[in-house]
Amino acid sequence: MRTLIAALACLSLALLPGSALGAPDTPHLAWGSQVNPAQCPTDQDYRYLEINVTHGVKNDADSGIAGNYWAADDYNKHIQVWKIGTAGEEEVFCAVVRYQGAFTTVAGASPGNSDVIAAGIEGTFQGGYRAIIVGTESPSPVYKRRGNIGVFDYGWTGIGAPTPFDWLGVYFATVTLFSFEWWGWVYHGGPNGTWVNSSDGNQGDITD
């Protein structure tokens, strides 16, 4: 899901690698404990669920360590945005975004860039991110704030880049700060291996 990280980089984020997770021969990611509203800041003693939507995504592209797109993704996405306080005249929110879906590899460098992979390897992935947003909500978003809002085709065909659904642009009139608190995904390729891509550090790989 590095495509998502790159798409939001224009909001001046610093994604710093950390230590590896678990033992090197058993890639593991405890993403559920991180992509959790219980991890949102509570210093202003306030938390209200403003946005709680799900949607499907098809034909997304997934980039790896080498910068290449190594897989095509289809997945379900769950977006929750909690209002947690104020900052001057603006409001502060905590976004908790979860992904669960499947990937199919394309030929090229492996996601962890340790080898090459053939096209057509299939697997599953889970993960997401937690972020702090400072800004103002849109008073009348074009999509509802609760429930399922449909399926979005990102249009990736193996050439060029995908076109993601801009949920921030839909639900926020202004965003002056978007800061990732944590992000990570774990990819299960069965006999082809497991890859962890996380702000805590990358681990493993998926190869032929």
Image (tube, helix red, strand yellow):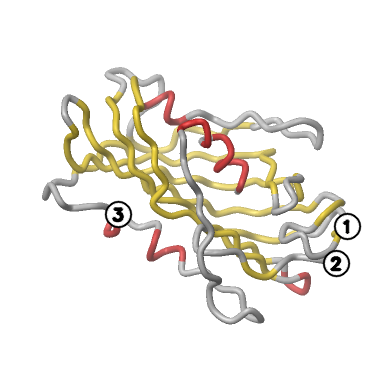
Residue 54 is situated, as x and y percent measured from the top left of the image, at 44, 41
Q: Residues within 10 Å of mark 2 (few under 14, many from 20)?
A: few
Q: Are marks 1 and 3 in contact (CB under 8 Å)?
A: no
- Residue 4 or residue 199, whichever sits in front: 199
Residue pictured at 18% horizontal, 46% vertical: 47
Residue identified by numbered label 3:
37
Where residue 90 sits, quadrant-wise, is: top left
| Quadrant of the image containing the C terminus | bottom right
Amino acid, disc 3: Pro
Please name the amino acid that badge 1 sits on.
Ala
User: Which of the labelled discs sits on residue 118, or is there none?
Assistant: 1
Which element carries disc 1, helix, strand or loop?
loop
Q: Is 46 above or below relative to 200? A: above
The correct choice, above or below, for 160 with respect to 63 in the image is above
Query: In the rendered image, which residue does mark 2 sit on?
Result: 208
Q: Is residue 173 left or right of residue 46?
A: right
Residue drawn at x 34%, y 22% is 174
Tags 2 and 1 touching, CB below 8 Å = yes
Pick whichever of labels 1 and 3 is earlier in the sequence: 3
